[in-house]
Image (cartoon, rainbow, N blue to C red):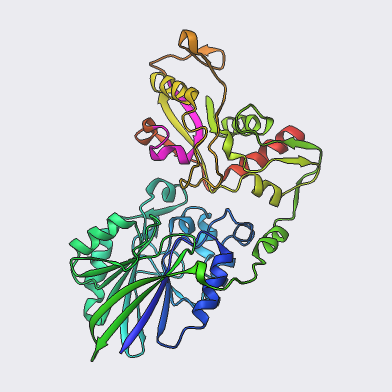
Amino acid sequence: MEIKLYHTNDIHSHLSTFNKIIRYLKDRPDDSYYVDLGDHVDRSHPYTEGTLGKGNVELLNEAHVKVATVGNNEGITLTHDDFNALYDQADFEVTCCNLFDMEGRLPRHIKLNVIDEFNGIKLGFIGATAEFTPFYKALGWQVTEPLEAIREQVEAIRSECDVVIILSHLGMFADRRIADEIPGIDLILGAHTHHHFEKGERVNGVLIGAAGRYGEYIGEIKLKFDEGHLVQKDARLIETDELANSEDHYYEDGRALLSEVIHQSPVSLPRRLYSASYATALLANELRVELDADCALINSGLIVQGYEGDSLTKYDLHKMLPHPINPVNITLSGRELKEVIAMSSKHEFRDEIVKGFGYRGDVFGMYVTDHIGYIQSERKFFVGDQPVDDHKSYTLATLDMYTFGRFFPQFVQNEKEYFMPEFLRDVMELALNRRFS
């Protein structure tokens, strides 16, 4: 007896590629079973933005997915209510054992585990998602430590299943720890860190499968059973580049869904990476005003596409700022703020192509500040017209992507207040309403 288990992860709304995956999976025989590991939703795509992820769920339905888990892009880029409603029309089960509301209840339609009998074999699935604690908290969710949550669920279902499978949106290193430290697991399907294993990886007798990102691969796991006992497990990857292309109408569908005009007067919002622009100055200023901060810091590459015209739509604004990036207020001492200003003035990432952190553009560009002054030759720093006091506290309005430590290591430990679920395009819309109403 053999079951082929297909898996995808981190599609990030690459819907043209996923269309090819749908066609491939629909042609599979009856001994196949399909699961998804989260981050299928990405609001950088206009169709996802226009449907708030429900269009992605419809596509997963079309692909006949049986079980899925939650990625951080499902969990922290939608409002509390929109995430609760995301799976209302799902024809599949969703499992995540470490995500709850503030009263300890699971999100709607989500289960701690799923047991499904398929061709006489009892498959046990346990999902878990990455621990983005401050972001979930700002949206009214609590995310718990995943390894202990997984351990508890494995102990709960092991005796009821022929095979225990972890659907992990935790990353490669966490998956290896799970395999090494938690007994009773047969298979881990991994996601989040966009890694792939051509023939899987084996740790402590556990097979780990991973299929990269953006639908580059479909993962295939062969599970062989003898009288209900798992006797062999093997992994391989199928390259989607080799699959036949299919028609993609989702971008135009998204454009139609976002056709509402939100600004009706002439406006020029250019994209300039290496010089000042009205668009970045407007965004930085509005960020400071909306967050009631002392000063603000962004980068010019955030403006992915400029706009000039007199009928700005939600689609135009989405094209300009497609990022699922939230504003954040960071409290810094004067001394720390000086360090940040001095670092930003070097523009060390100006020509770098940035991937991840919620960034959906290409070149990082120059740092852009608001209400900050710096006389480099004299090492003098100002907030507004006042010199920065080393011992005073200041609030800096900036981007959540800067808080992961790569750009400004100081931000990791400092007090932060995340503003969610607002994205930068929401801030820009407020700026346009304020300036031109």
Left or right of 351? Residue 105 is left
Q: Tell me the quarter of the image containing the C terminus.
A: top right
Left or right of 424? Residue 147 is left
In the rendered image of this protein, does residue 127 appear above or below residue 42? Answer: below
**Residue 305 at x, y = what percent?**
66, 43
> Does residue 20 appear in this view?
yes
In the rendered image of this protein, does residue 107 appear above or below residue 289? Answer: below
**Residue 354 at x, y = what percent?**
49, 42
Would you say residue 329 sits in the magenta stretch? Answer: no
Q: Residue at x 28, y 71 (%)?
A: 187
Would you say residue 398 sits in the magenta stretch? Answer: yes
**Residue 367 at x, y = what percent?**
53, 29
Left or right of 294? Residue 415 is left
Q: Residue at x 39, y 37 (%)?
A: 406
Left or right of 84? Residue 411 is left
Q: Residue at x 23, y 76 (%)?
A: 158
Q: Residue at x 19, y 62 (%)?
A: 180
Q: Which residues are magenta?
A: 393-408
